[in-house]
Image (cartoon, helix red, strand yellow):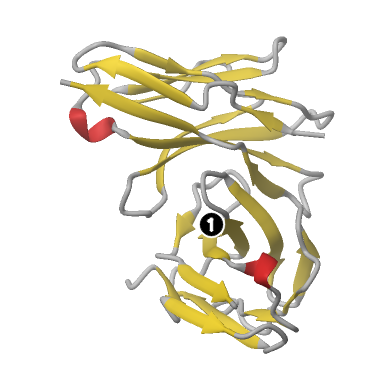
Amino acid sequence: AQKITQTQPGMFVQEKEAVTLDCTYDTSDPSYGLFWYKQPSSGEMIFLIYQGSYDQQNATEGRYSLNFQKARKSANLVISASQLGDSAMYFCAMREGDGSYDKVIFGPGTSLSVIP
Amino acid sequence: NAGVTQTPKFQVLKTGQSMTLQCAQDMNHEYMSWYRQDPGMGLRLIHYSVGAGITDQGEVPNGYNVSRSTTEDFPLRLLSAAPSQTSVYFCASSEGLAGKQYFGPGTRLTVT
């Protein structure tokens, strides 16, 4: 069964607008973490933001924020004031485990295109 | 710091050949992983390690072996290459369970 679902294969956003990339996850572990990574066309993986399952507040990193809704098991990425350089693949990932053998798995990704 | 390094960058193998993809990190990270990324898809976890001497299987471990004799190195061995193993392989490390993963530049492998 898919552990991480990203239902938007492709998204378009106007430059300077905000955009939300969806991510839902499935786990029975009480302790887990959620990540977002960006992969530009050059291929490298760039860490954007992290949210722990016990964190009380939504994570923010500059123009990135994570809309964490634990009961709905969703961890959407919000990018404010989109820039042309934000055009890339975006992957949601989850760390799960019992604390000794945790592993990080990725969703299928969303392709974001920023339009001038 | 060099971060996470992977060699080679590109490799072409014939079906049935074996090879080792090298991964090294100089950040003293305990946690290391191998992923494969197929065209238009996300990363799938092959094997991971939570420290020297400790490894475990990920989502797609068949056809691959790993070992972790030192903190720095985490090689991935393809036992008998198959065309289905054509992919881009990423190695990653992190300093803790909640830490961000640092990725290597990837190895593009083609099996003919």
Q: Please, is residue B90 above or below residue A98 in the view?
A: below
Task: Please name the amino acid that badge 1 sits on.
Answer: Ser
Q: Quadrant of the C terminus of chain A?
A: top left
Question: Can residue A79 be seen in this snapshot?
Answer: no
Q: How many marks?
A: 1
**Residue under the image location 76 percent in, 33 percent down:** A2
Badge 1 marks a residue whose secondary structure is strand
**Residue under the image location 50 percent in, 52 percent down:** B101
Residue A96 on image: x %, y %: 73, 40
Q: Is residue B55 left or right of residue B110?
A: right
Q: Is residue B55 left or right of residue B1?
A: right
Which of A36/B12 is in front?
A: B12
- Which residue corresponds to mark 1? B94
Question: Can residue A58 be seen in this snapshot?
Answer: yes
Question: Splitting the image into 4 quarters, where does residue A7 fall?
Answer: top right
Q: Quadrant of the N terminus of chain A?
A: top right
Question: Splitting the image into 4 quarters, where does residue A33 fall?
Answer: top right
**Residue under the image location 78 percent in, 73 percent down:** B63
